[in-house]
Image: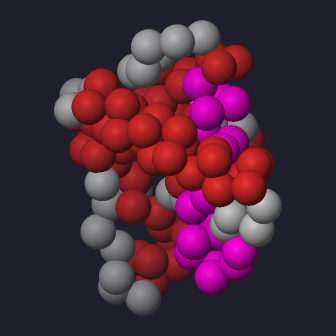
């Protein structure tokens, strides 16, 4: 929700087209289809809620809303995504000692990003 709030707060006048244009054409089409489906089913709330985590990451990185290079941010977000997916899909997220040691660093990165986006 912190990512969602920050994206919406940085484009109040221009609206969703401002951040939708930052997505690749493939991702934008996917979001637009989801929006259309949500509207058809009368469950639409906002455009940003029709995006996936990867879309929000892309917007935040491209807008420069976090400190660090785009390369380093994308690397951190790959680790966050890996942990998120493992947790969300009930996979083993710390099968090895090396993987287990990455978890606290990844959580620290998440907390640091949240602090910056607030």
| Quadrant of the image occupied by residue 8 | top left
- Say whether residue 25 is left or right of residue 62: right
- Is most of the magenta stretch helix, strand or loop? helix
Is 13 situated above or below 40? above
Is 67 situated above or below 55? above
Instruction: Tell me where residue 36 appears, x and y as whole percent.
Output: 51, 71
Q: Nearer the viewer, residue 27 or 6?
A: 6
Give the residue drawn at x 63%, y 47%: 101
- Say whether residue 96 is left or right of residue 29: right
Give the residue drawn at x 68%, y 42%: 78
Q: Quadrant of the N terminus?
A: bottom left
| Quadrant of the image occupied by residue 96 | bottom right
- Say whether residue 91 is left or right of residue 33: right
Total labels drawn: 0
Give the residue drawn at x 52%, y 12%: 68
Is 94 situated above or below 13? below
Q: Residue furthest front?
A: 97
Does residue 104 show up magenta in the picture? no
Residue 114 visible:
yes
Does residue 86 show up magenta in the picture? yes
Give the residue drawn at x 45%, y 83%: 40
Q: Nearer the viewer, residue 100 or 65?
A: 100
Q: Nearer the viewer, residue 15 or 109?
A: 109
Q: Which residues are magenta?
A: 73-92
Residue 19 visible:
no
Is 67 situated above or below 84? above
């Amino acid at each position: 929700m912190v990512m969602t709030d920050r994206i919406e707060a940085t484009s109040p006048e221009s609206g969703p087209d401002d951040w939708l244009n930052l997505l690749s054409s493939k991702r934008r089409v996917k979001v637009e289809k989801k929006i259309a489906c949500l509207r058809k089913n009368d469950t639409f709330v906002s455009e940003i809620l029709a995006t996936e985590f990867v879309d929000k990451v892309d917007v935040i990185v491209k807008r420069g809303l976090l400190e660090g290079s785009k390369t380093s941010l994308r690397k951190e977000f790959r680790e966050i995504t890996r942990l998120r997916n493992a947790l969300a899909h009930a996979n083993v997220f710390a099968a090895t000692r090396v993987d287990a040691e990455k978890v606290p660093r990844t959580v620290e990165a998440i907390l640091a990003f949240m602090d910056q986006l607030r």
